[in-house]
Amino acid sequence: MGSTTAALPALATKPKFIFFTDFDGTITQQDSNDYLTDNLGYGGERRRQGNQDVLAERRDFRDTFQEMMDSVQGTPFDQCIKVLLQHITLDAGFLAFFHWARENNVPIVVLSGGMEPIIRALLAHFLGKEEADTLQIVSNNVAQRSPGKSINEEGGWKIVFHDDSGFGHDKSIEIRPYANLPEGERPVLFYAGDGVSDLSAAKETDLLFAKAGRDLVTYCEQQNVPFTTFESFDDILATVKYIVAGKLSVKDAATGRK
């Protein structure tokens, strides 16, 4: 399994279950990109309209997110991180879920439409750097806007998308190779998310956790995608524990909106 494990790092410990998850608004209680846009960029009203346009398939997520980040980039990147460290909080149940998953060989893979330096800074703040570094993160990145300009000066940074898709980061591309593994090698796959950046991942796993009251629930109902809602990772942990113990099937767990 050497070459397969190299291509699919979550298989390194030969797990029977893998947990893929969004970061912003899922692991965290607030979306860091929304917070930056609402407070340092063009504001919440325009951002929310962009999300509605994506849900209605009038625009690609990539384009609306590019506009969001362009409206923020006047603030130096290190200052953006400083602001987020002061205002973004961790989901109340994630720490317990993180430790349980590690103790029970359930790899957590963070798939984010945000930017890796922000995610790593927040996770190091919440979990400690050593523990945060154990998590695989697949996301967009950040780069200097022009040669000779630092990302930590006004107008100095820009988002660098992970791929050329209309999402900027098509999360399904990361999940699908695991889903396509032959019987006997394929783990049970979970995904947790909350918003429009999760639309591409919604159909790819065995059980989708969609955060209650958020856009992903609306999308799943529109597209007839099986899911179950969650309020916090406490709910997720309880359900995943039952499934791992063989007391609940993923099909029966997909109860929809509660």
Image (cartoon, grey):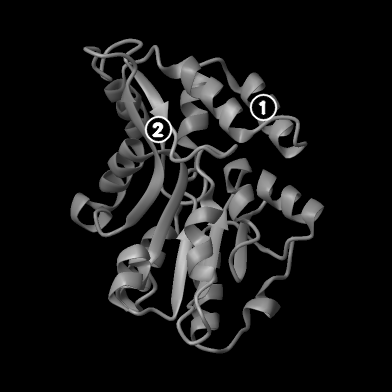
Residue 228 in the image, given as x and y percentages of width and height: 67, 65
For mark 2, give the secondary structure.
helix
- Relative to residue 100, is residue 133 depicted above or below? above
Q: Is residue 30 visible?
A: yes
Residue sticking out furthest to the front? 3
Q: CA distance from mark 1 to mark 2?
A: 23 Å
For mark 1, give the secondary structure.
helix
Other-residue count near label 1 (Cα within 10 Å), few / some / many at <14 / 14–19 / ≥20? many
Q: Which mark is residue 50?
A: 1
Residue 161 in the image, given as x and y percentages of width and height: 44, 34
Residue 69 in the image, given as x and y percentages of width and height: 48, 23
Residue at 30 percent across and 27 percent down: it is 82
Q: Which residue is more in the foreground, 98 or 71?
A: 71
Q: Is residue 18 left or right of residue 165?
A: left
Q: Which mark is residue 87?
A: 2
Residue at 36 percent across and 60 percent down: it is 95
Q: Is residue 187 left or right of residue 126?
A: right
Q: Is residue 214 visible?
A: no
Residue 74 in the image, given as x and y percentages of width and height: 39, 11
Callout 1 amino acid: Gly
